[in-house]
Image (cartoon, helix red, strand yellow):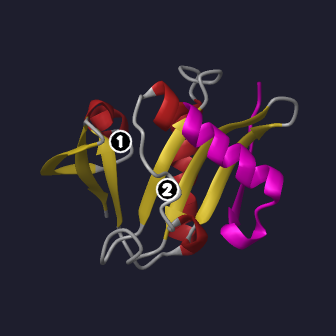
Amino acid sequence: MTLSYSCKPFAQLSIDELYAILRLRQEVFIVEQSCPYLDADGKDIKGYHLMGVDENKGLHGYTRLLPEGVYYSGYTSIGRVINSTTVRGKGYGKELMQLSIMKIKELYPDYPIKIGAQAYLKKFYESFGFVDIGIPYLEDGIPHIIMILV
């Protein structure tokens, strides 16, 4: 399987793209991880949406790229990082993060990146240069950490 990537602001997403994004986020974050929460947090409309799509099988990778101040003051943010179960363990997560970092730096070059990462993914994010700044927290019962990339 090969994924092709595109990145669009919210206003340019088609109805089918938006539906696929919301479905994938709900499948993983709400159903698979058993975390009932309001995914539609109002931030989607302010950011860009990086999508990894297989033309025959749909959306398999996704991140939300937010400008400075939407989530963190003084930082941009990459969030809702997700791969479908179909592509996990095949290197698409690394590809998705590399592209997300490149794209957010292209869109917002004057700001460092801050993320709230699930704690078990610390080494994954460190492999891209993110540093844990020592602020652990629980979000929907899942341990998270704050990480930055300058």
Across and down, in percent, residue 131 comes to 23, 50
Name which residue type carries label 2. Ile
Viewer-proximal residue among 56 and 102: 56
Q: Nearer the viewer, residue 83 or 92?
A: 83
Q: Could you tell me which quadrant the C terminus lies in?
A: bottom left
The magenta stretch is 1-27
In this rendering, the answer to whether 1 lies above or below 140 is: above
Q: Residue at 56%, 39% (x, y): give it.
A: 26
Disc nearer the start of the sequence (1/2): 2
Q: Of the residues shown, which amino acid type is indicated by label 1? A: Tyr
Tell me the residue at 42%/39% (across/down). 36
Q: Is residue 114 magenta?
A: no
Q: Is residue 80 left or right of residue 124?
A: right
- For residue 101, the mark is 2
* Residue 104 makes an appearance in the image: yes
Disc 1, SS = helix
Q: Quadrant of residue 149?
A: bottom left
Residue extending farthest right: 56
Q: Look at 42% across and 79% down and name the residue there.
A: 110
Q: Secondary structure at mark 2?
A: helix
* Dot label at residue 16: none
Q: Is residue 54 above or below residue 64?
A: above
Residue 60, position as x, y percentages in the image: 67, 34
Residue 49: x and y in percent read 63, 58
Q: Is residue 95 visible?
A: no
Q: Quadrant of residue 20?
A: top right
What residue did someone put label 1 on? 125
76 relative position to 81: left or right: left
Marker count (numbered): 2
